[in-house]
């Protein structure tokens, strides 16, 4: 997630004049596409989600209790984001801020909700995928890979819209790799083995780019006819294999670093605020860009130039300051979880909540929080998300709050202990 945030903060090439904000992409610079093979870490985000979901679902007492708790935690941090951004663009325009940069900011603030929409569906499918994992093992990933390839063929030969099916096939495969890792199925005998896995994954990715219809960049580029990410192509699955091999090779060094007290504290702080950091890092960038571009007339230096490298730490530092401020204000919503009452809810209602919220999140990702041609559109999308949250929202009884507060630390410690036990058994895998 830290890599996602850093890439999003450093990508924009911005300039402002005559009330118009223009935006380019630094990674569109010649030769910079290779950087995206490492910085496009969405495969690893879904992989990590798969491992985390495996640990928690395996010990869950009830499928619907687990689904309800998981979906509620994912959706709750969206509410303050929506409350702010449904009003803020209109307030800025009324205060005299030029409309075009405000519209751009409103769209950017909602654009990244695509991930949450897909992840909610992946979480909803976790019980099914877990059962298939237990029964069929690696064959599940094989079937998903075949489905992704078939979708790509239809996407390029029939209709680009068919490609959106891969938003499930590709990311479910990455999620499934997380199952195998958590269960010890990705145990590597040596660093040479994991390095070989990385070579195979990146080699297949290179072959797909060189011989196939896939672009070299692993993120969408302005004006490009095809994107490997929107929607994802099957090449994301080979990239997943390559990145897995790389990080498994580097795992001993990363583990030693993560065990340092300062690193441990920092990672724990970030890990418990995962959704808040993700949802508010683009508004933090909007704040930085608004002050620098609209307020001070600053323009992004040429990417790769000495000035660009000199300004980058300051740019990231200011954005980081705003993100910390937003996290301190809105991070509390990520912890507003309650125990109890889940047994009264049918599995169908939980699934309905996932579908409603995913639809609303996709609408916001496509339209943003402000739409001059359809002013009620963003409100309706937010209402869908809110409806999904209300379906899975647990009863806020005093007894439930006390029970929750007394069990939070032991449960989290048990999950971490279980994860550490399994991972230590895997060696370098």
Image: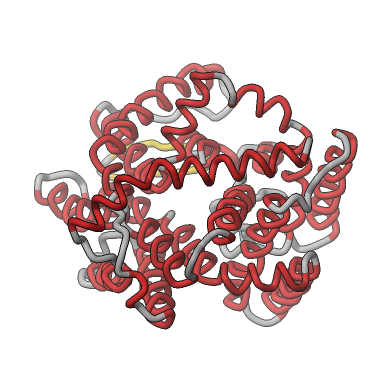
Residue at image position (20%, 51%) is 84
| Left or right position of 357 against 137 | left
Residue at image position (33%, 60%) is 368
Residue at image position (31%, 47%) is 335
- The x and y percentages for residue 399 are 22, 57
Q: Quadrant of residue 290?
A: top left
Question: Looking at the image, is 207 positioned above or below residue 24?
Answer: below
Q: How many marks?
A: 0
Question: Looking at the image, is 92 positioned above or below residue 341?
Answer: above
- The x and y percentages for residue 155 are 67, 75
Residue at image position (10%, 45%) is 95
Q: Quadrant of residue 197?
A: top right
Tell me, yes or no, if residue 282 can be seen here.
no
| Left or right position of 8 against 199 | left
**Which quarter of the image is occupied by the C terminus?**
top right
| Left or right position of 411 against 105 | right
| Left or right position of 290 against 44 | left
- The x and y percentages for residue 158 are 68, 82
Question: Looking at the image, is 192 positioned above or below residue 173?
Answer: above
Front residue (pair 130, 291): 130
- The x and y percentages for residue 396 are 21, 61
Front residue (pair 36, 74): 74
Front residue (pair 97, 271): 271
């Amino acid at each position: 997630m830290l890599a996602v945030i850093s890439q999003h903060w450093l990508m924009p090439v911005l300039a402002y004049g005559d009330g118009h904000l223009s935006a380019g992409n630094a990674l569109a610079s010649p030769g910079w596409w290779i950087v995206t093979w490492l910085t496009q870490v969405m495969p690893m985000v879904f992989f990590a989600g798969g491992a985390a979901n495996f640990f928690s679902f395996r010990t869950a007492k009830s499928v619907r209790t687990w689904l309800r708790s998981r979906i509620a935690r994912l959706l709750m941090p969206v509410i303050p984001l929506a409350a702010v951004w449904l009003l803020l663009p209109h307030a800025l325009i009324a205060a005299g801020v030029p409309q075009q940069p405000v519209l751009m900011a409103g769209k950017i603030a909602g654009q990244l909700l695509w991930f949450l929409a897909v992840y909610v569906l992946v979480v909803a499918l976790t019980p099914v995928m877990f059962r298939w994992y237990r029964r069929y093992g690696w064959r599940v990933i094989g079937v998903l890979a075949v489905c992704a390839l078939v979708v790509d063929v239809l996407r390029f030969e029939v209709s680009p819209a068919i490609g959106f099916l891969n938003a499930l096939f590709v990311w479910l495969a990455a999620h499934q790799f997380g199952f195998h890792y958590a269960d010890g199925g990705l145990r590597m005998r040596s660093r040479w083995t994991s390095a070989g896995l990385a070579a195979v994954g990146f080699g297949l990715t290179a072959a797909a780019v060189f011989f196939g219809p896939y672009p070299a960049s692993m993120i969408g580029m302005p004006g490009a006819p095809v994107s490997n990410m929107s929607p994802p192509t099957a090449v994301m699955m080979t990239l997943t294999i390559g990145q897995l091999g790389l990080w498994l090779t580097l795992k001993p060094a990363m583990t030693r670093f993560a065990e340092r007290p300062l690193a441990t504290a920092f990672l724990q702080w970030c890990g418990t605020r995962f959704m808040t950091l993700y949802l508010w890092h683009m508004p933090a960038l909007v704040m930085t860009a608004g002050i620098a571009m609209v307020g001070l007339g600053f323009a992004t230096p040429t990417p790769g130039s000495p000035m660009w490298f000199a300004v980058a730490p300051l740019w990231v530092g200011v954005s980081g300051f705003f993100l910390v401020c937003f996290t301190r204000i809105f991070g509390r919503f990520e912890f507003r979880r309650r125990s109890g009452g889940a047994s009264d809810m049918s599995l169908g209602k939980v699934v309905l909540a996932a579908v409603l919220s995913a639809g609303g999140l996709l609408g916001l990702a496509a339209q943003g929080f402000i739409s001059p041609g359809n002013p009620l559109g963003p409100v309706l999308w937010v209402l869908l998300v809110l409806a999904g949250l209300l379906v899975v929202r647990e009863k806020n009884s005093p007894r439930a709050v006390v029970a929750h507060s007394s069990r939070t630390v032991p449960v989290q410690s048990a999950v971490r202990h279980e994860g550490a036990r399994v991972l230590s058994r895997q060696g370098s895998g």
